[in-house]
Amino acid sequence: MLAKFTGWALLVVIRLLTGAQARWWGCPPKAEQRIYFANHQSHLDLVMIWAALPEELRSITRPIAARDYWATSPFKRWITTEVFNAIYVERGGSAPVPPPAAAPAPSEERIEPSFDAVVQTELPLSPPVVETMEPTAPVVPGSAEALAPLQPLIEALQSGDSIIIFPEGTRGHTGEPQKFKSGLFTLAQMFPEVVLVPAWIDNVQRVMPKGEVVPVPILCSVTFGEPVRLEEGEERRPFLDRAREAVVALRYV
């Protein structure tokens, strides 16, 4: 009950602050399983799309939320999980960086590493010391390692939910969406029956510019475009570029 009341109150505040105007230009609001993919310029993007959706769609649609921002306090965790029913994801570069390895202790005799030869100490009974460099195995598309970051989204889609994603992976600050990352392509391959709906979020970056904590009243809108689909045999980059162009085109509608 508290989460529902908070959701209603938040919806009123957001609509008073931004207008949260939804423009269904390319498709009607429909209770079918969808992946909404949009440009990303503010932490409020997920809130903006959530508020723009009709109530019957909000209840079946889960936005993604960056864990390193939305899970940093008990209140943020509560509102993203209980009100928005968001899916936490790890943003690129947010993983902790391991500390540098300690320098080896000085010794009287130093053995220089070699990657193509056997180096043997002067002690007669010591076995030969071989220095090798383990090759870094490439991440295979479709492997468990490649799908790990998408697993929360895959589980949500498997359960029948619609989701809201931002294929740029991180916020942009130039007004132009960055190149889309491969997650949208992978999800389109895995769930061909799910409808892919592009969306353009306008002006929300001006409501709360980077570094600010007090929002500014600005009229904002979300324009939902004509669905796109992954064509048979279409490769990753052409599809992602086409999906990005579908989002950008909505700016001028």
Image: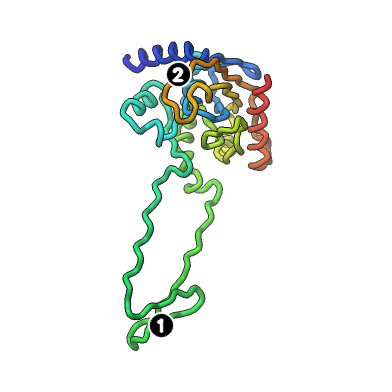
Q: Which residue is mark 2?
A: 59
- The label shown at residue 184 is none
- Mark 2–mark 1 Cα distance, whole angstroms, equals 68 Å
State the residue in front, 68 or 159. 68
Q: Residue at x 50, y 25 (%)?
A: 45
**Can you give x and y, in whole percent of width and height, for residue 86 in the image?**
42, 27
**Can you give x and y, in whole percent of width and height, for residue 205 in the image?**
53, 25
Quadrant housing residue 213: top left
Quadrant housing residue 250: top right
Can residue 56 be seen here? The reply is no
Q: Amino acid at mark 1?
A: Gln
Q: Residue at x 64, y 22 (%)?
A: 225
**Can you give x and y, in whole percent of width and height, for residue 190 in the image?**
55, 37
Q: Quadrant of the C terminus?
A: top right
Of mark 2 and mark 1, the one earlier in the sequence is: 2
Quadrant housing residue 70: top left
Assess whether mark 1 and mark 2 are in contact (beta carbons under 8 angstroms). Answer: no
Q: Which of the colour schemes (rainbow, by chain, secondary structure, one colour) is used?
A: rainbow
Q: Residues within 10 Å of mark 2 (few under 14, many from 20)?
A: some
Tell me the mark number nearer the camera, choosing from 2 and 1: 1
Q: Residue at x 60, y 24 (%)?
A: 200
**Can you give x and y, in whole percent of width and height, for residue 42 in the image?**
50, 28
Q: Amino acid at mark 2?
A: Ser
Can residue 115 be seen here? The reply is yes
Label 2 sits on a secondary structure element that is loop
Q: Residue at x 46, y 70 (%)?
A: 132
Label 1 sits on a secondary structure element that is loop
Q: Residues within 10 Å of mark 1 (few under 14, many from 20)?
A: few
Rendered view: 230 above or below 22:
below
Q: Quadrant of the N terminus?
A: top left
Q: Which residue is mark 1?
A: 120
State the residue in front, 26 or 45. 45
